[in-house]
Amino acid sequence: MTKKIEDGLDPNRWRALAVIAMASLMVVLDSSIVNIAIPSAQRDLHISAANRQWVVTAYTLAFGSLLLLGGRIADLVGRKKIFIVGLLGFAGASAIGGIASTQGMLFGARALQGVFGALLAPAALSLINVTFTLPKERAKAFGVYGAISGGGAAIGLILGGTLTEYANWRWCLGVNVPIALITVAMALPWLHESHAEGDHKYDIPGAITVSLGLLSLVYGFSQAATHGWAKSSTYQYFIIAAVLLVIFFIIETRVEGPLLPIRVLAERNRAGSYLATILIGAGLFTMFLFLSIYFQNIHGYSALRSGFAFLPFSGGVILFAGVAANLMPKVGARPLMLTGLVMATAGLFYLSRFTPTSSYTTAILPAMIIMSTGLALVFIPSATTGLHGVGGRDSGVASAMINTSQQIGGSLGAALLNTVAVTATTAYATAHSSMGKSVQAFAMVHGFSVAFRVGAGFLAIAAIVIALTINVGKHASEATEGVVLH
């Protein structure tokens, strides 16, 4: 290494990584930490069973649908500037959520968190890319980022349980405020501003149509929970969603600087990865919502105990992700992903057999271990196949699409499976009214069971998609080594 190259390195780069890591941890924490708080928030704000999914969906929908636009804004306006704007906005939205007096105020705050998260997350990734210019150091930096993404959810579960039990569920949102402000104070001196070259064109029509289209689709699912599937008040939203999403894809073929260049979807491995990721998100996101309610409302677990009850799942993903990374060059992406999805499908179906009197060690723990092991075999290969053969100019969009697909799948799945659960719960309670008061617990768990079986169906379909679309060989990871996530 020459002295000249050494002098060209940012002396604050490792401090900058600490700043970026704090911000990224806050965003990752926010998903799992809120799941633990939902039962308490539902009681305090009188949120109905049909509407509880909006605590999750409002965030994931805003975050997922605006992520691509957020990355474009960060690149062109300035990554440091947008990073700080994202932090301050996230802190403000969290504060609003923490003092929410109505469910509408909480849902709005969660959506606002998603908006600023969509600015913050891609800016953080881009800052790592431009701050670390040496490939070996950049790999270490992305390794730290990946560890935070994997381990942050587990930390969130414990922190959420602790705050909910010993303080108040509102602190699960309020805790973001001091974290964000401290991170801003560190970012100002330690981060350097950078911009991408190119014209300053934003695909605003695309962002509006895809966001409103997805919102209409989710709202349609929500309406079905209270009004039924066949009512005009429900299916009109599905029609609106279909029209808007068709318009979005037409816009993407004609506008300069599209949010989602259609050529990114033209390669079968990438398209298959994105579709499978949507299905996986749809099948799994609601599991955390339902199990959190099951642990606390049916079994009487404290919020903290509920957080620890999820740890085997997070631990399994983290542990077996390393196994997947080692196996990938030896067996290839497709066999790993198929094996993992079959395991995850079996695990979620096994979980659907639980009852209000089921034991954690026999009904929940085995399912978590099977699912987490399987999903770990999917996540690493899907990131590789999602970037397969992508050109340098599309690497940022292609890598962002992996996260976008997961978030959109999660928001659609939360809305749909919550509707399935509410509908099944109502039907069970009506058919078994002679059971008396105990019918409520059995009806609720029956609803969750039906939703889990539908979720297992999504995972099975994802396996079929992988079988039909993924055809890269064992050395797929080598083909994308030069691609840097944005």
Image (spheres, rainbow, N blue to C red):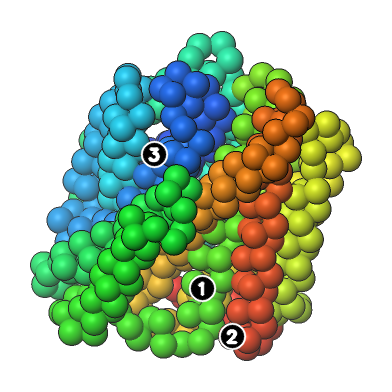
In this rendering, position of residue 289 left or right of residue 71: right
Pointers 1 and 2 in contact (C-beta within 8 Å): yes
Looking at this view, is 450 or 84 the one in front? 450
Looking at this view, is 393 or 116 the one in front? 116
Decide: is 1 above or below 104: below
Q: Nearer the viewer, mark 3 or mark 1?
A: 1
Residue identifier under label 3: 23
- Look at the numbered disc 2 and give the secondary structure of its residue: helix
Question: Residue at horizontal 68%, vertical 70%?
Answer: 460
To which quarter of the image does residue 174 belong? top left
Question: Residue at horizontal 19%, vertical 46%?
Answer: 81
- Look at the numbered disc 1 and give the secondary structure of its residue: helix
Mark earlier in primary sequence (2, 3): 3
Q: Residue 223 in the image: state x and y as whole percent.
A: 40, 50
Q: Which mark is residue 458?
A: none
Question: Residue at horizontal 35%, vertical 86%?
Answer: 263
- Furthest toward the top, the residue is 166
Q: Which mark is residue 469?
A: 2
